[in-house]
Image (tube, helix red, strand yellow):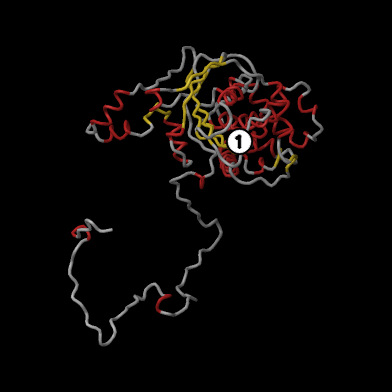
């Protein structure tokens, strides 16, 4: 029998290795090019939930949820181009707050409907949905705020697949798997153990890292849970990734059937505070009340406030993000040398032409030629000249 210190050290090393692998590219081959074939089945078996919604108009339009403001500015959009909507679904007594860019494309009703298709126990781990325009369709999740670029509804299957994938990041990053003490599935030893039993990953995107691999397997697990006949209805060799999607399927079942449609919300991520779009309320706090004009604007505006309804447990949010680091404004990229690589001490040299104008440290000098009288300059400004009556 292994001594307890040895077991502790071994488990510690295993945990460190798992976390190191969490964001490393995976070398297993992709089973499919993408998961588009799952869209129709998902759409047919995750029905629309009835809803009612309204936009923040009039004085309320001066405001936007702080989380939406941050994502808008991080991705280069003006907050003035966003409309905010409160959406209440029949399966929850607390609304969701959606932030919609004016050039996003799809009608707001279509966005409300496709978002409703997410099973409520999964949707509860999304605090805000932000819809913005772009040339290509892509998305990310930052602390439970899902941002979708160029959301294409079409039949709705692709949009639902994208939302399921992004919501899966919330389940993984926000501790939704209560049966495992809120552990992140993608960084768990149990996940790595089952991943190692399979020969493939779902598709090319799942090869990105274990975080994306887990999210893609969550979409597959959702299909297997909700679609009659499950994955067996599709002619694909699912056995090559069985242990991965089966692990997600087990964790979600043990944690209250997170991927199953129906029921009511019992938990919700907190809704971010409403802030003025121009930032004047935050600036006023920094100015310690000195800006009277901004204070007057804030007093005239009606600040929207949304509280989590009775009987709903508030999820304590955890910080994470799947946004590409170089795509976020204000983030300085830093590249460090990898382990085992010796840093070469640079020496100065140049192959630039040796002409004086080509060398940055040589100052060009132009002298007045012989026989030319140098005038003594006098100071004046064009504002002193009178151009009145000049045609």
Q: Secondary structure at mark 1?
A: helix
Q: Is residue 184 visible in this depiction of the protein?
A: no
Q: Quadrant of residue 47?
A: top right
Q: Quadrant of the N terminus?
A: top right
Nearer the observer, 270 or 319: 270
Q: Position of residue 237 (x, y in %)?
A: 80, 35
Q: Quadrant of residue 120?
A: top right
Q: To which residue does mark 1 refer?
A: 186
Tell which of 386 and 184 is nearer to you: 386
Q: Position of residue 335 (x, y in %)?
A: 50, 54
Depth check: give the residue in front, 282 or 165: 282
Q: Position of residue 314 (x, y in %)?
A: 47, 20
**Does the rendering let one see residue 19?**
yes
Q: Residues within 10 Å of mark 1 (few under 14, many from 20)?
A: many
Question: Could you tell me which residue is drawn at 64 percent across and 26 percent down?
Answer: 251
Q: Residue at x 72, y 30 (%)?
A: 38
Q: Tell whether 41 sits left or right of 278.
A: right
| 124, 47: nearer the viewer | 47
* 61 with respect to 107 (left or right): left
276 left or right, relative to 352:
left
């Amino acid at each position: 029998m292994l001594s307890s210190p040895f077991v502790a050290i071994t488990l510690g090393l295993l945990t460190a290795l798992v976390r190191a692998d969490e964001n490393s590219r995976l070398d297993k081959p992709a089973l499919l090019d993408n998961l588009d074939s799952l869209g129709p089945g998902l759409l047919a078996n995750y029905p629309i939930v009835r809803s009612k919604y309204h936009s923040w108009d009039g004085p309320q339009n001066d405001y936007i949820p702080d989380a939406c403001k941050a994502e808008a500015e991080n991705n280069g959009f003006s907050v003035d181009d966003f409309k905010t909507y409160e959406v209440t679904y029949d399966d929850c007594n607390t609304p969701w707050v959606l932030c919609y860019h004016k050039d996003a494309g799809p009608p707001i009703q279509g966005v409300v409907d496709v978002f409703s298709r997410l099973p409520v126990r999964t949707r509860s781990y999304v605090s805000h949905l932000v819809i913005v325009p772009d040339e290509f369709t892509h998305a990310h999740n930052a602390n439970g705020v899902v941002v979708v670029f160029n959301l294409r509804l079409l039949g709705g299957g692709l949009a639902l697949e994208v939302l399921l994938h992004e919501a899966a990041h919330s389940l993984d990053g926000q501790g939704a798997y209560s049966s495992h003490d809120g552990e992140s599935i993608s960084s768990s030893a149990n996940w790595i153990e089952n991943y190692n039993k399979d020969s493939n990953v779902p598709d090319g995107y799942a090869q990105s890292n274990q975080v994306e691999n887990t999210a893609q397997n969550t979409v597959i697990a959702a299909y297997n849970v909700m679609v009659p006949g499950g994955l067996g209805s599709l002619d694909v060799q699912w056995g090559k990734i069985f242990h991965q999607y089966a692990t997600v399927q087990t964790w979600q079942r043990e944690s209250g059937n997170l991927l199953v449609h129906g029921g009511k919300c019992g938990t919700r991520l907190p809704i971010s505070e409403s802030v003025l779009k121009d930032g004047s309320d935050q600036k006023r706090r920094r100015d310690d009340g000195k800006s009277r004009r901004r204070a007057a604007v804030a007093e005239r505006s009606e600040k929207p406030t949304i509280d989590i309804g009775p009987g709903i447990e508030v999820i304590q949010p955890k910080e994470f993000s799947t946004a590409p680091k170089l795509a976020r404004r204000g983030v300085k990229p830093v590249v460090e040398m990898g382990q085992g690589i010796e840093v070469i001490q640079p020496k100065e040299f140049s192959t630039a032409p040796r002409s004086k104008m080509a060398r940055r440290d040589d100052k060009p000098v132009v002298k007045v030629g012989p026989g030319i009288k140098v005038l003594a300059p006098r100071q004046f400004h064009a504002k002193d000249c009178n151009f009145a009556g000049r045609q």
